[in-house]
Image (tube, rainbow, N blue to C red):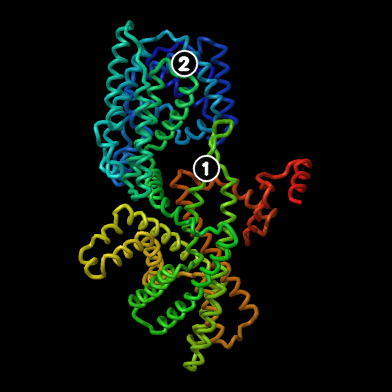
Amino acid sequence: MQVTLLKMTTTADTALVPLLVELVDGLRPRRASDERAAIHNVQALCYLLETHPDYRAALRRALLYLLSTCWQVPLYTETGILSNETFFATLRRRIGLRLLPPVSDPHSLKDRFAQVFHRGDDYEWLANVPRENWFELGRALHFEEEQDHDSIARTRVQMLESIQTLSCRLAAIGLEPEIVRNYPEVQRFESPFVHQNIEALAYIERYRAAMIDEGLPKDDDAQILVLLDQCEAQIAKVRRSAARQGVSVSLTYHLIRIRQHIERMRLLLDLVDPDSDRDSRAERLLSVMIGLVRAENRKHSIRDVFSENTELLALQVTENASRTGEHYIAENRREWMSMFKSAAGAGFIVGFMSLVKLLTAKAHLPLLLEAVAFGLNYALGFMLIHMLHFTIATKQPAMTAAKIAASIHQQTNKSGKKQLDLDELAQLIVKVLRTQFIAIFGNVALSMPVALALALGWKYAFGAPVVDAAKAQHLLHDLSPIASLALFHAGIAGCCLFLAGLISGYYDNKSIYNKIPERIAALPWLNKLIGEWRTRRLSGYIEHNLGALAGNFYFGMMLGTIGTIGVLIGLPVDIRHITFSSAYLSYAAVTLDFNIGLNVLLISLAGILLIGLTNLAVSFGLALWVALRSRKLNFRATRPLLGKILRHFFTYPGDFLLPPPSPKPAPDGVPRLEAPIDNAETAREWIRLRR
């Protein structure tokens, strides 16, 4: 680095850019994850700049030359901001750029920026360096010593042009039909989206005039910042309205773009304002700088196109799923027992559904008809379970995972990095685990004896078991996690459960967004046919249950048709579900007159347990992944969560099976214990009051 800085002091302006590239190469650690090396390199550069005034003067000259001679506006207005393109247009463009990269424009700061940070992982090591070290580097440059005011002025003019571009685009996005639909007031002339553009243009004209005539009074951007605050307030109202009226992918997309434009405008206004707080300006510039580097490093990434769009879809779907998930978490013993009763009711119905499934298989229908019959049996059975307010245990994870992700909060640590607040999240997961345990227990506790009773009754009534001996052996074979693909098939069922959860969230949102209940209530022919009062009841039921009914229907059809699809394409594809598998064990046992070896019985029971765990793990993992994606998080950020859950398990293992008892109300005159007793005096006082 010292050699590079020395070259800068004797090099002409036109040759400074390659030296900037060389300097960044010297700062860059060999591995992007090597945080210690990155920090050491930045500290070494700070030391060189502080001890050699000619070095920092040369580096300032190089930076100002780069800024003043290149076209800056696209870097500020496009990089790191979502484009107004469709998914397929963006995908086609990036594939074309990967196959035939564009020619670099030496007069574009955007292309020069990509030339300086040319490694695809530069944003990683930049983010690993603590903010204090970057602030120290900024101070070491001593920009207050700079005398090249012409270059600074040219840079500010381009920043003003960027503010103008961002302001015009913000006004246009704020008047998009999707925004107006959820909050009609934004289309009025007094709308802050329109007014901020008028104020920004006036501010830019006054600023340019003050740059020409130094005798004119300086203007400030306070009014623009107030209007940007009002824009954010209106966007918050749009979000609240969308929570009631439903959201669409395009609405979510527009809201994200508005937030990005507002943040970028705030940054540029800070940079062009000489009186702004230096620390605040440095903090904001640093965060945007890293974002710009990341955007340039990954501007041709095809994977990011899918990533960004799945985040939008996930955000749309999980909002409703997270609210639904609250009903699948037992907070106390009364709710825990209620969940057991609900799951037991579902197990009772599954006993009959498994009988219909076996009888349909005995009919040997044509493949497609058989697939439809299997699917309708599952679908109608699951819908009936929902209508009776019963619960299938494996349907819980797809709903509760979204609720878990919605409860994740981030906080900023001392080094300025964001980290997850996992204490509350760990408690929530413990509640989810014990609720799912009792739900599975309730399903299996009723499905096995009901299936056993049906099998014995069928054999008594018709003189023959429901299935023959060969089919019974086949059912037992399918339960073995060793001799069959039971766990693989259970994983496929888990994927179906995950998709059913997404479908439920999608239809819940669709019902609200498209006003389906209101449109049903307004149907003239339906009001005439069943009456106005019944029509309103029907529309109200659809409003609260359309998503669940649609999810159950599609889930049933998926379970019924996947096995047939496997036969048609010649692949060993099928499904295994814990509740049905436990019922099939009862039918096989009756057919074989309970002559099942202990070894086979234990393997079958172990298979049922592992099938259930696989169902839950796959569906929960996929649903949690989508919910985390909707909040721009990943599993790596939640790694410390496992340690907290394990510590809770070893300290209070009973909490994973049974909720702790509710605290008894304190007698009159005795204060409620709000915090742990932390000293002997408090303990004695508490005992005295209790007595």
Q: Is residue 265 above or below residue 11?
A: below
Judging depth in this view, the residue of 350 and 11 nearest the camera is 350
Give the residue type that dot 1 points to.
Answer: His
Q: Does residue 455 appear left or right of residue 310 in this picture?
A: right
Judge by depth and name the residue closer to the eye, 326 or 146. 326
Dot 2 corresponds to which residue?
Answer: 59
Q: Mark 2 belongs to which amino acid?
A: Leu
Is residue 661 in view?
yes
Q: Is residue 643 above or below residue 658?
A: above
Residue 433 is situated, as x and y percent measured from the top left of the image, at 57, 59
Furthest-top residue in this view: 215
Q: Position of residue 279 (x, y in %)?
A: 50, 21
Of helix, strand and loop, which one carries label 1? strand
Q: Is residue 407 above or below residue 472?
A: above
- Residue 376 disc label: none
Q: Quadrant of residue 363?
A: bottom left
